[in-house]
Image: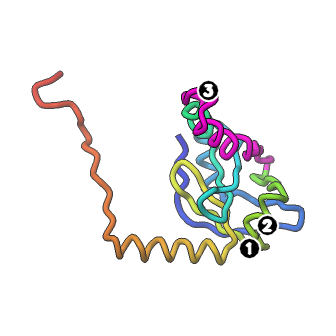
Amino acid sequence: MTQFVGTHFGKLDRKGRISVPAIFRAELEAAATNQLVFRLAHTHPCIEARSRPVFQQIVDSIQALPHFSEERELLEATLISGSEMLKLDGEGRLVLPAEMIEDCALGEQVGFLGKGDRFEIWNEEAARAHVADAKKRARELRLTVAATPLNTTPRGVS
């Protein structure tokens, strides 16, 4: 499974090309894939990118919902229909769809935010503001993460 971490900055050229950060490309290489699924986020003004295997997990979850249910229909239209599968070229670049660039107001400078199983592409100023706001809110809320025990086998059970 891919683990995209860190905040990185790059450029978007006039043709809509970006160079995916080397550390993210290394994760894709370790996962034996160069295909990414891109979609407009429905919660923030950014583009989400996931490896194909991670995106497939989302598709599988949606397809487990009852056929013809409103929830399934909404998720299919939002998450699946609005996605684009793109492949990195030999130099780690790809061309973003023009509609996505426009919807996210991406300029020449972009930010890549690693978020574990995905990364997001933001307008650089918006990315910096988002990270700063998230840090501030996490401090105010004193957020914590529960520790996961290394050994989950109860004592006395083999």
**Circle 2 is placed at which residue position?**
12
> Disc 2 or 1, which lies upstream in sequence?
2
Residue 8 within the magenta-colored segment of the rendering: no
Q: Is residue 13 left or right of residue 2?
A: right
Q: Position of residue 58 (x, y in %)?
A: 58, 38
Q: Position of residue 29 (x, y in %)?
A: 64, 42
Q: Given the image, on which type of amino acid does mark 3 rest?
A: His
Q: Position of residue 154 (x, y in %)?
A: 16, 31
Tell me the SS state at disc 2: loop
Question: Comparing marks 3 and 1, which lies closer to the viewer?
Answer: 3
Residue 94's tag is none
Quadrant hosting residue 97:
bottom right
Q: Residue at x 31, y 62 (%)?
A: 144
**Residue 53 visible in image:** no
Distance from disc 3 to disc 2, alpha carbons, whole Å, reads 40 Å
Q: Residue at x 69, y 71 (%)?
A: 123
**Circle 1 is placed at which residue position?**
109
Query: Magenta segment, which residues?
Result: 63-90
Q: Residue at x 70, y 51 (%)?
A: 39
Q: Given the image, on which type of amino acid does mark 2 rest?
A: Leu
Q: Residue furthest top?
A: 158
**Circle 3 is placed at which residue position?**
67
Q: Nearer the viewer, residue 5 or 144?
A: 144
Quadrant hosting residue 61:
top right
> Do the numbered discs 2 and 1 sit on residues whose CB atoms are within 8 Å?
yes
Q: Is residue 158 left or right of residue 30?
A: left
> Disc 3 or 1, which lies upstream in sequence?
3
Residue 76 within the magenta-colored segment of the rendering: yes
Question: Comparing marks 3 and 2, which lies closer to the viewer?
Answer: 3
